[in-house]
């Protein structure tokens, strides 16, 4: 009788005879872990550039899809009238804003690419510099994406700078409110308050499944700067995820100055 020998993919045990979909998911997880491991070792400019480009590409795809669903190039229905030159600046500004919001696939792809790319890039830089992801980081990223959206989409009207500032502030306030509401409703149980930073770190690395390992070994937020490879090994975390966790802790400003002893 043939014996099925399980193999490892991205730190996960995979049976060769199991569902092909599960095999593909395991392979994608392995690629994701390797990519995040590589990205974590890059400088801030490189990481920000990669994050910006990938997020902008995703935003462009979403924008193009939404523009297609809206029925093609909606901006063609909002062409300036023959006497556009005689219209007052406020009327022309309103027309341009309507064109920006009712554009077809290419216009919406551009708009969404700017918003998502700028938001992700600014957020990445802020998190690397400040060592945390909070409402200030979220609002700063939203302000930048809102201001750039106003400039690129043509919604600026007769005073692009002022409108970019207004749009940025509006985006920041909305994002800040959403962030605070999300924090309120996603407040962890009382017994999990010692693992807030740990949970955030593991989530950023795509290693949420190992939170139970940290709890099993009582590796709380307080112990993060002190964690060593042997400590992670003791709680049964595989080599790949261990390297990502140690690299993350090593480069975080909040932790690296408090690292003690060999890893």
Image: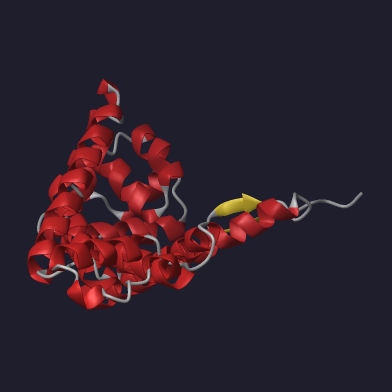
Closest to the observer, 226 or 207: 207
Q: Is residue 71 left or right of residue 49?
A: right
Q: Please provide percent x and percent y for residue 97.
A: 27, 62
- In percent of the image, x 60 and y 56: which residue is there? 26
Task: Give the answer, above or below, for where 140 lies relative to 161.
Answer: above
Closest to the observer, 228 or 205: 205
- In percent of the image, x 48 and y 62: which residue is there? 67
Give the position of the C terminus as an image quadrant: bottom left
- In percent of the image, x 88 and y 52: which residue is there? 2
Q: Please provide percent x and percent y for residue 227.
A: 25, 50
Residue 43 makes an appearance in the image: no
Quadrant of the rendered structure where residue 55 is? bottom left
Q: Please provide percent x and percent y for residue 71.
A: 54, 60
Closest to the observer, 247 or 153: 153
Task: Give the answer, above or below, for where 201 lies relative to 262.
Answer: above
Q: How many marks?
A: 0
Closest to the observer, 179 or 187: 179
Quadrant of the rendered structure where residue 77 is? bottom left
What color scheme is it? secondary structure
Q: Please provide percent x and percent y for residue 82.
A: 32, 76
For this orientation, the residue located farthest to the right is 1
For this orientation, the residue located farthest to the top is 190
Residue 158 makes an appearance in the image: yes
- In percent of the image, x 17 and y 64: which residue is there? 147
């Amino acid at each position: 009788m043939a014996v099925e020998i399980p193999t490892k993919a991205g730190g996960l045990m995979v049976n060769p005879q199991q569902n092909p979909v599960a095999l593909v998911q395991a392979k994608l997880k392995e690629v994701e872990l390797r990519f995040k491991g590589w990205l974590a070792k890059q400088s801030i400019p490189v990481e920000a550039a990669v994050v910006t480009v990938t997020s902008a590409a995703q935003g462009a795809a979403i924008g193009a899809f939404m523009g297609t669903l809206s029925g093609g190039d909606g901006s063609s229905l909002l062409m300036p009238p023959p006497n556009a030159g005689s219209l007052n600046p406020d009327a022309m500004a309103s027309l341009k804003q309507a064109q920006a919001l009712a554009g077809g696939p290419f216009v919406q792809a551009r708009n969404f690419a700017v918003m998502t790319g700028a938001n992700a890039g600014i957020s990445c830089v802020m998190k690397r510099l400040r060592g945390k992801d909070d409402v200030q980081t979220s609002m700063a990223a939203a302000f930048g994406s809102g201001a750039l959206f106003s400039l690129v989409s043509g919604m600026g009207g007769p005073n692009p700078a002022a409108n970019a500032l207004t749009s940025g502030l509006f985006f920041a306030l909305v994002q800040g409110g959403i962030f605070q509401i999300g924090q309120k409703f996603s407040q962890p149980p009382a017994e999990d308050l010692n693992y807030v930073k740990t949970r955030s770190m593991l989530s950023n690395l795509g290693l949420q499944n190992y939170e139970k390992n940290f709890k099993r070994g009582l590796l709380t937020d307080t112990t993060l700067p002190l964690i060593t490879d042997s400590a992670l090994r003791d709680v049964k975390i595989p080599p790949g995820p261990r390297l990502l966790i140690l690299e993350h802790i090593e480069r975080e400003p909040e932790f690296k100055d408090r690292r003690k002893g060999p890893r």
